[in-house]
Image (tube, helix red, strand yellow):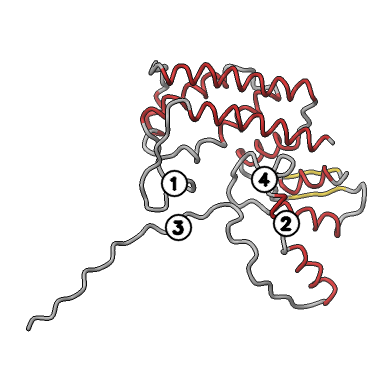
Amino acid sequence: MKKTEPSPRPLRPPPQRRAFSTLQGPIDTAGSTTEARALERLFKVDPGLERALTHGFHSYAGRLHPSIARGAIARYSPAGGVVLDPFCGSGTVLVEGLAAGRRASGIDASPLAVGIARVRTTRLDEPLRERLVTEARRIAEESGEMARKRRRPELPRWVEAERQPFHAHVVLELATLRELIFALKESDPVALALRMCFSSLLVKFMRSGPSAPRDGEQKRIARGLPSRFFADRAAELAQGHEELER
């Protein structure tokens, strides 16, 4: 009698890693008992701070948890002192330093990181916050209307190289959003904030990525959805700046 081998199980794609998805693991301590206990407390993070202040509006990779930054600043920097982060990434330590009443400076090699950190830490007073939300809504309405009516924008040549990760209609809508955003003067702090809000959408609206279904299917993205998310992201950033100002 011929022995039959069981058919192999289909391979499943590995689960996507998300920001802060590997927290609350075991903590090993050594060295000074006092400092070991202090560091152990730092790594028992407060999940409620993940989207506090201006922390949550951009999913920049490799972010430090705000809870760790807040605890470290409180323990290791004097009131009214200076906080320096020489590898600041998207600016979590800088935001927490400002919120704690410190002066904060950061350095990073990534232009994207510097742009996000600048937007998260540059004060937007109430008139600027209102204009940020108003401009975002205006741009989103115009872009979303074009997407729903399937009006094709003029695409620069370099867009062709960026098509592959996105559905065709999403590429057109993102290109429209970008064109409307970049029509604003670069020196305008609202314009820079809108650019970083746009940057925060790109991974979310790829065919596959951190928010894709776990069975490996590609995401279905309705026309107008990226534009609505863009307006919502700007409103979230404005709210974060209001909280930071308080």
Question: Which residue does the image show at 59% across and 27% down from the upper left?
Answer: 231
Distance from disc 3 to disc 1, alpha carbons, whole Å, reads: 10 Å
Q: Closer to the observer: label 2 or label 4?
A: 2
Q: Earlier in the sequence, mark 4 or mark 1?
A: 4
Distance from disc 1 to disc 2, alpha carbons, whole Å, reads: 26 Å
Distance from disc 3 to disc 2, alpha carbons, whole Å, reads: 24 Å
Task: Return the residue at label 2.
Answer: 46
Distance from disc 4 to disc 1, alpha carbons, whole Å, reads: 30 Å
Q: In the displayed structure, would residue 128 be above or below residue 110?
A: above
Task: Please report contact status of discs 1 and 2: CB closer than 8 Å, yes or no.
Answer: no
Q: Residues within 10 Å of mark 2 (few under 14, many from 20)?
A: few
Task: Return the residue at label 1.
Answer: 212
Q: Amino acid at mark 3?
A: Pro
Q: Is residue 169 left or right of residue 67?
A: left
Res 108 label: 4
Q: Residues within 10 Å of mark 1 (few under 14, many from 20)?
A: some
Q: Closer to the observer: label 4 or label 1?
A: 1
Residue at the left extreme of this rendering: 1
Q: Amino acid at mark 2?
A: Asp
